[in-house]
């Protein structure tokens, strides 16, 4: 098979696949399938939002702890220099 024949065969197979998919998606089973896909996508979106919110809360907590740690170090350094003076 030469390159032109392979190209034409690919076009025909691609067109057939698109036609089959279009027919399937118009059937009741296809509509049910798309509904299931949409529901799964909605669930995934909700899960992603929940995990993103949880991540945001964890980052905020870590930042608060980090700021408190720096403040504690600064206070210890001030106390230490005040005692030495």
Image (tube, rainbow, N blue to C red):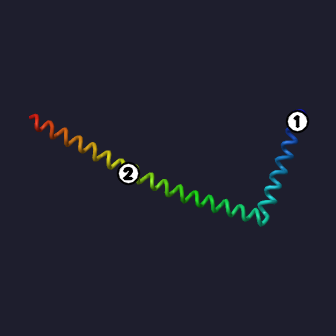
Using residue 44 as the reference point, say whether residue 70 is left or right of it. left
Residue 74 falls in image quadrant: top left
Q: Position of residue 12 (x, y in %)?
A: 86, 46
Disc 2/disc 1 C-alpha distance (Å): 60 Å
Disc 1: CA contacts within 10 A as few (<14), some (14-19) or many (>=20): few
The image quadrant where one finds the N terminus is top right
- The number of numbered badges drawn on the structure is 2
Looking at the image, is 52 positioned above or below residue 81? below
Q: Position of residue 77 (x, y in %)?
A: 19, 38
Front: mark 2 or 1? 2
Question: What's the residue at 23%, 44% (across, down)?
Answer: 72
Q: Position of residue 28 (x, y in %)?
A: 77, 66
Label drawn at residue 60: 2
Question: What's the residue at 53%, 55% (across, down)?
Answer: 48
Disc 2: CA contacts within 10 A as few (<14), some (14-19) or many (>=20): few
Looking at the image, is 8 positioned above or below residue 25? above
Residue carrying label 1: 4
SS at mark 2 in the image: helix
Question: What's the residue at 54%, 57% (across, down)?
Answer: 47
């Amino acid at each position: 098979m030469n390159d032109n024949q392979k190209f034409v065969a690919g076009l025909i197979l691609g067109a057939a696949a698109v036609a089959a998919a279009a027919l399937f998606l118009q059937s009741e089973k296809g509509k049910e399938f798309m509904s299931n896909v949409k529901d799964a996508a909605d669930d995934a979106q909700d899960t992603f939002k929940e995990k993103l919110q949880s991540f945001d809360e964890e980052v905020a907590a870590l930042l608060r702890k980090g700021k408190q740690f720096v403040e504690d170090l600064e206070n210890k350094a001030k106390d230490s220099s005040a005692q030495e003076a």
